[in-house]
Image (spheres, rainbow, N blue to C red):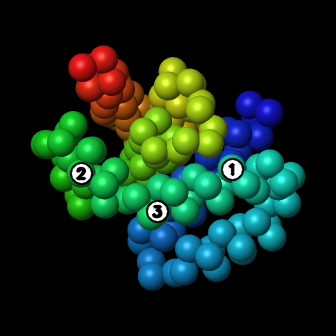
Amino acid sequence: MASLRRRVRAIALQILFELDATDHSPDQVVARRLEEERLPPEGERFLRRLVFGAWEHASYLDRIIEETAPNWPVSQMPGVDKAILRIALFEALIDEEEKTPLKAIINEAVELAKQYGSDNSSRFVNGVLGTVVSRYRERRKG
């Protein structure tokens, strides 16, 4: 299951990157990618939840990113890093269905950044997510 989830996150990253760079319809892009990928039903559900969740909440997630990394405006951030952060933050802060452990979310995001991002992406993603998780935990305690 872990390898399926990693594969789905990678596909979600690619879809979100495309959506951010074009005016393509999320429904059409997801449908096209699902035809290409042939995921099992649980993978398809997970992909839809990640893509549509991160896309629908992009403005909110971008505000969190900008609050956490004010020297890196989201509008100037590499698209891969932005997509990875949106997916991870959606999973960590919004997705009520999966309840993926925060450590696993961060680890998966860092691995995606290593595979698809620039040389500094994994450190940047890890730093942003680590800071957000720390703040999130403090708010939940308070």
Query: For the residue labelled by badge 1, is the local secondary structure a helix, a strand or a loop?
Result: helix
Inspect the image, locate mark 2, and give the three-letter code of the amino acid beneath it: Arg
Name the residue: 77% across, 40% down: 4
Say few, some or many: other residues with alpha carbon within 10 Å of mark 2 (under 14 / 14 to 19 / 20 or more). Answer: some
Q: Quadrant of residue 68?
A: top left
Q: Are marks 2 and 3 in contact (CB under 8 Å)?
A: no
Q: Position of residue 19 (x, y in %)?
A: 48, 70
Mark 2 or mark 3, earlier in chain: 3
Identify the mark at residue 131; answer none if there is no mark: none
Q: Which residue is mark 2?
A: 63
Q: Which residue is mark 3?
A: 55
Q: Position of residue 10 (x, y in %)?
A: 62, 48
Inspect the image, locate mark 3, and give the three-letter code of the amino acid beneath it: Trp
The Cα–Cα distance between marks 2 and 1, rounded to whole angstroms, is 24 Å
Mark 2 or mark 1, earlier in chain: 1
Quadrant containing the C terminus in the rendered view: top left
Identify the mark at residue 46; answer none if there is no mark: 1
Quadrant containing the N terminus in the rendered view: top right
Question: Image check: 103 left or right of 59?
Answer: right
Image height of 100 relative to 28, above or below: above
Q: Quadrant of residue 36?
A: bottom right
Q: Are marks 3 and 1 in contact (CB under 8 Å)?
A: no
Query: For the residue labelled by badge 2, is the local secondary structure a helix, a strand or a loop?
Result: helix
Question: Image check: 2 left or right of 116?
Answer: right
The Cα–Cα distance between marks 3 and 1, rounded to whole angstroms, is 14 Å
Q: Position of residue 23 (x, y in %)?
A: 45, 82
Inspect the image, locate mark 1, and give the three-letter code of the amino acid beneath it: Phe
Q: Quadrant of residue 47?
A: bottom right
